[in-house]
Amino acid sequence: MITYIEDKSPKYPPRTYANASADATIAFAFDFGTPGELLTKDAVEKQGKLYIQVFPSFVNSLKIKNVATFVSDAKVKTINIAGNSLPIIIKNNFTQLYCDTFVHEFMKLLINHPIFDCNIQIIRSGGQSGFDEAGIKAAIKLGIPALIHCPKGFKFINEHGETICDEVLFKRRFEI
């Protein structure tokens, strides 16, 4: 259910631009001013794609309706889930489990909203910890094909801010 693409580069920007080629990027973040969030927004805008920011504090019907309207009007078929990594989430007193639950609930409500008129073919992300990871887990639970385009070496950041390059550990996070 998950397709993995390991980028040629061990750096994050190339995979960010690749993932930003989706029809729409939904960015979940407590801090949209981090270098990663700024890069994501830039990558999406440079490719002329839809960029939607979601502050992950609570899900309400107006937020879901607004996103459903934007996504449906754009006839979105592919969604990139992006957002803060785990160290930033922990700094805001939240956990990976919170991210997983929030993104799953958000996406479930989105695709089941009455005005949602899209056939989502794939949800993709860079597979980073935090909201990237949560997006792939949500895709799996919702039965939507998932694609992870990650840096060379299957690089991700753990809760301590340490960079891990390990394919087995990378993929183990998505075993549901």
Image (tube, rainbow, N blue to C red):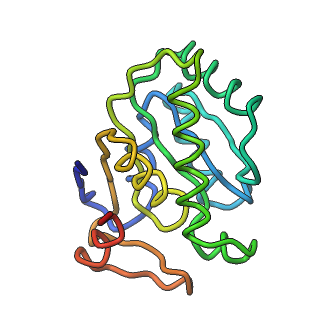
Residue drawn at point x = 67 percent, y = 31 percent: 64
Q: Position of residue 152 (x, y in %)?
A: 28, 66
**Residue 10, image quadrant:** bottom left
| Closer to the camera in the image, 173 or 5 | 173
Q: Quadrant of the C terminus?
A: bottom left
Query: Up-down: is 112 above or below 125?
Result: above
| Closer to the camera in the image, 4 or 10 | 4
Residue drawn at point x = 54 percent, y = 33 percent: 46
Q: Position of residue 16 (x, y in %)?
A: 45, 51
**Residue 144, image quadrant:** top left
Residue drawn at point x = 76 percent, y = 54 percent: 57
| Closer to the camera in the image, 147 or 56 | 56
Give the number of marks: 0
Query: Up-down: is 100 above or below 82?
Result: below
Task: Report whether 63 appears left or right of 159.
Answer: right
Residue drawn at point x = 56 percent, y = 57 percent: 101
Task: Report whether 157 appears left or right of 45.
Answer: left
Task: Report whether 114 appears left or right of 22.
Answer: right
Q: Position of residue 28 (x, y in %)?
A: 63, 50
Task: Report whether 52 appears left or right of 97.
Answer: right
Query: Up-down: is 106 above or below 175?
Result: above
